[in-house]
Amino acid sequence: MLKWWVRGAWGLEWAVRRRLDPGPWRLGGACQACAKCCERPAIRAGPLTFWLPWLRAAFLAWQRRVNGFELVEADPDTRTFLFRCTHFDWASRRCDSYASRPHMCRDYPRGLLAQPWPELFDGCGHTVVLKKGDGLAAAIEATDLDPEARAELRRRLRLE
């Protein structure tokens, strides 16, 4: 019940946040069910959560009990916790708790669109595209670059 309530509150917060500030990126492509996002979930924590022992212990206990995330590594430089998901089946590459998966799993990769330069896993079927890149794309087309160089520049700048 608690997980259901938290998932609903978190989802509402994300919906409001997206409505107020949709960001410069949109998602292209589609999920190819590669499950790379499930292999090693990572959560970047705030400074208090990462450095205060009692808050860190509560955060990790929540992740272990509610989400089934077992801590593998903690990176102090980025304040990121790297986990092993107990619900991920490596043989079938499926989640055995798909209907009640955590919000961060439900929201991947949309949750990354708020970052300045979102990075997706290699081989992910999704792509990140700049929303208002038409002017930049037109400027690239007006250059004297060869077609291959223009295509590479558009790709690297995430204009397509």
Image (cartoon, helix red, strand yellow):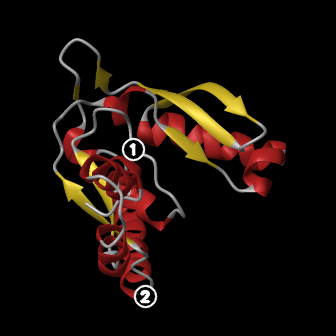
Q: Is residue 41 visible?
A: yes
**On the image, which quarter does residue 99 sit in?**
top left
Query: What residue is at 23 percent from the left and 30 percent from the top?
Result: 34
- Residue in the foreground of this view, choosing between 65 and 36: 36
Mark 1 — residue?
A: 120
Q: Residues within 10 Å of mark 2 (few under 14, many from 20)?
A: few
- Vertical arrangement, residue 126 with respect to residue 6, above or below: above
**Count of numbered circles in the view:** 2
Query: What residue is at 32 percent from the left and 56 percent from the top?
Result: 150
Looking at the picture, how far across and down is residue 15, in whole percent? 35, 77
**Looking at numbered disc 1 in the image, what kind of residue is underneath it?**
Leu
Secondary structure found at label 1:
loop
Cα separation, mark 1 vs mark 2, equals 24 Å
- Vertical arrangement, residue 125 with respect to residue 11, above or below: above
- Vertical arrangement, residue 122 with respect to residue 109, above or below: above
Query: What residue is at 41 percent from the left and 59 percent from the top?
Result: 157
Looking at the picture, how far across and down is residue 65, in whole percent? 49, 36
* Residue 91 as seen in the image, left or right of residue 9: left
Residue at the outermost right position: 52
The dot on residue 29 is none
Q: Nearer the viewer, mark 1 or mark 2?
A: 1
- Residue in the foreground of this view, choosing between 80 and 11: 80
Mark 2 — residue?
A: 20
* Residue 153 as seen in the image, left or right of residue 28: right
- Residue in the foreground of this view, choosing between 60 and 33: 33
Looking at the picture, how far across and down is residue 49, in whole percent? 73, 52
Secondary structure found at label 2:
helix
Residue at the outermost top position: 91
